[in-house]
Amino acid sequence: VIWLGQPEHSVITTCAYCGVGCGFKAEMKGTQVVRMVPWKDGKANEGHSCVKGRFAWGYATHQDRITKPMIRASIQDPWQEVSWEVALNHAASEFRRIQAKHGKDSIGGITSSRCTNEETYLVQKLIRAAFGNNNVDTCARVCHSPTGYGLGQTLGTSAGTQTFKSVEKADVIMVIGANPSEAHPVFASRMKRRLREGAKLIVVDPRRIDLVKSPHIQAAHHLQLKPGTNVAVITALAHVIVTEGLVNEAYVAERCDPKSFNQWREFVARPENSPEALEAASGVPAAELRGAARLYATGASDGTAAVTRRPNAAIYYGLGVTEHSQGSTMVMGIANLAMATGNVGREGVGVNPLRGQNNVQGSCDMGSFPHELPGYRHISDSTVRGQFEAAWGVTLNPEPGLRIPNMFDAALSGSFKALYCEGEDIVQSDPNTKHVAAAMMAMECVVVQDIFLNETAKYAHVFLPGSSFLEKDGTFTNAERRISRVRKVMPPLAGYADWEVTQKLAQALGYPMDYKNPEEIMAEIAALTPTFAGVSYEKIERLGSVQWPCNEHTEEAGTPIMHVDKFVRGKGRFIITQYVPTDEKVTRKFPLLLTTGRILSQYNVGAQTRRTPNNQWHSEDRLEIHPHDAEERGIKDDDWVGIASRAGDTVLRATVTERVQPGVVYTTFHFPESGANVITTDNSDWATNCPEYKVTAVQVMPVQQP
Ligand code: SF4
C-alpha cells in the first residue's frame, strides 16, 4: 500500500467491480484519491471490502487512459486526435450515411454493466429514438440473460429474490456454478460466517472450489458434475423430492399454478429422471444426489429429519448455471426446486443469482435488451410503447432488434454495418474471438467509448474517451436490487462524463436530448418504469440506498424479500426441464472439457485490475489440469501448454492440480495475451443466446515457451 498523504475530505460512492455493490468512502486530498475505505453504513457490505474495491482503483488515473477523442479512416491508419465536436459529428454523419445506404436497421449499439443506470438508459434511448431501431444489447447477454428469462417465466420478475442479509437465516445453502470466494468475496464472507455457525452446505460445481473444504467449513455434498450436465443434476434432485414425498404440498397448493406443477411432478417422477438413471450422464454418484436433495428439502441428508420443521434452504448461483446451452432451462430448474419445497418468500431462502459485474441487474432493468423497454416490458406492447413514444417524441419500432451474436452474424452477411459500443470489450469478452474480430472488420464504422484502447478499439474508427466511476455521478443496482449512488470525486479526465457523451452524440444525430444532470435522467426512468417508481436521488441520499420495488406499496427503503405473499406473476409456474446434452462433445481429437471462471484479484477482461497493484497477485491466466491428464501428456507444473478447440488455439502455462477432475481443464479470461475466448465456441443458450463459455472440447499438449 502506498501512502498518498493525509485525506482532507471524503465522498461516499459504490465499488466499480462486482455485483455485491459495496459502499466505499473515497478519501481525498484535493481531487486525488488517497484511499478507499469500506463504508460502515453500506448495506451491502457493512464495512467490509475485498482486494478489488479496496486497492484496485488506481487505473482511473493510469497513464494508458485516453483523454482525447480520436478518429481514423481505416483500422490500418494511425489514430488522429480531434476535438469532441469533430469526433461526434464524424460518428453521427457516418451513422446517417450508412443508414441512408443500407437501411435504418444496419446500425446498432452495445452498452455495458459497468455503466450506471442513467448511462445505460440513455444508450438504449439513443438507439431506439435516434437510430430508430431496437438493435441494442448489453453484456448481460453473455452472463445473466438466462436469469432474466428463467426467473421471469417462473416467478414473474427478472431479479434475485433476497437481500444479502437473508443468508444469515439460512439453514441449508446450495451454491451452484458460483465461486463467491473469488468473484463475490464480501458476500462470500457473510455466507461463510453462517456456515461456520452450522448451516449445511451443498456445492454443485465441476471444480473443487475453496468452499468445498476451507477452514471450519466442509460441504456436506459436493456434486462434482461433468461440465454441461447441470440440468441432469437439477432434474435428479427434483425426482428425489417428488418421489420421496418431500414436496411442500401446502405451499404449492396455495402459491403455485396447479396445472404446471402436476405436469412437472409427473415429468420429474419418471424413472429416466432418477439419480440412478442420470448418474452416468452427470458423473455424480446417485447416493450424493439423493443425499443433497434430502438435505435441501428436509435439513438432513438421510431424510430422517421428517418434514416437521422445514429448513430455510437458499440457492445461490452464478455463471456456471447461465453460460450453457441449457442456461435458461437450469435457471427454471432452480426456481422449480425452490417453489416445490416452499423456499421462496421469506428470509433465509430464495433463488439468488450472484451477478458478475456491478450493474448487471441495472443494465437489464434499464431496457438494454433488444426486445424489452425499461422495466422488462416487451417492445411489441403497444400500450407501453405509447408511453415511451409520448415521452420521447418519436414513433418506436415494435419489432425486437438484434442480439449481440446476431449483430456479428449480420455484419458477416453484410446487413449490419456500424456499431456504437460503450464500456464493453466485446473482442476479448465474447466467445470465439476469430468470429468476433471478422465481424468487426466487416463493419464500415465502429465507435468505441471507453477509458482505454482495449481489444475492441483495435477495430474502431472513432474513439470517444469514457470516464471511470470516480469521474461520474449516477446509480448502480447490485445483485439484491439495491440502488446505490456512485458519486463524482474528480472531474472527468476527458472533459465529459459518459452520459454527456451519449447525449452529445444524440444531439449530433439531430435528436434533442438535454438533461442537466443524471438526477434528471433518473426522474425520467422512475416516471416511465414501474419497477423504479418511487426511486429518487433525494430518497437514496436520505436512506443510503433503496431496493426496488420501493413505491407506495412497500417500505420506504423498498423490498428486501420478494414474492412474500404471492409471486410477482401471481401463481408460481413450474417449467419442465428436459436434460439435453450439449452439442459440444469430446472426441479423440478434443478429449478434454474446458471450463472458465475468475480469480480474486482480477476482474473480467482485466482492463481495470491489470493496471493496478492487484496484478502482482495474479499476472497471467493459467490452465488447471488434473495430475492424471498432465502425466498422460508429459506436462509438469508451470510448463507452457498449447490448448486447441474447434474455434481456435492459444498458449498459456499449466497448473497441475486436483481442483479439477480428470477430463476437465479450467482457465480464467483476464488477459488478452492468452485470450481464453479464442478457444470458446459459438454454442449458446437456446432461449437467450448466452454463450456456452463453460463447456468447450479441447486438446492440451506441451509446447516450447513462446
Ligand atoms: Fe465489494 Fe465486489 Fe467491490 Fe469486492 S469487488 S469490494 S466484493 S463490490
Image (spheres, rainbow, N blue to C red):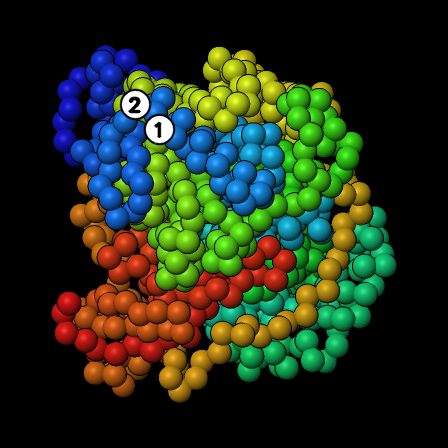
The answer to whether mark 2 is within 8 Å of ligand 1 is: no
Report the disc number at residue 34: none
**In terms of depth relative to the viewer, which is nearer, 132 or 653?**
132
**Residue located 30% across and 76% down the image:** 700
The answer to whether mark 1 is within 8 Å of ligand 1 is: no
- Mark 1: few/some/many CA within 10 Å (<14, 14-19, 20+): many
Residue underneath mark 2: 83
**Residue located 68% across and 47% down the image:** 152
**Residue located 17% across and 17% down the image:** 6
Residue 393 relative to residue 514: left or right: right
Q: In which quarter of the image is the C terminus?
A: bottom left
The percent coordinates of residue 616 (x first, y second) are 18, 48
The percent coordinates of residue 629 (x first, y second) are 31, 81
**In terms of depth relative to the viewer, which is nearer, 438 or 597?**
438
Report the disc number at residue 87: 1
Q: Is mark 2 on a helix, strand or loop?
A: loop
Q: What element carries label 1?
A: helix
Kind of residue indicated by mark 2:
Ser
In this view, which residue lies farthest toward the front?
101
Res 580 visible: yes
The percent coordinates of residue 436 (x first, y second) are 41, 56
- Please tell me in which quadrant of the rendered image residue 591 appears: bottom left
- Mark 2: few/some/many CA within 10 Å (<14, 14-19, 20+): few
**Residue located 14% across and 31% down the image:** 2
Q: Quadrant of the N terminus?
A: top left
Res 551 visible: no
**In terms of depth relative to the viewer, which is nearer, 596 or 124?**
124
Kind of residue indicated by mark 1:
Ala
The percent coordinates of residue 265 (x first, y second) are 78, 66
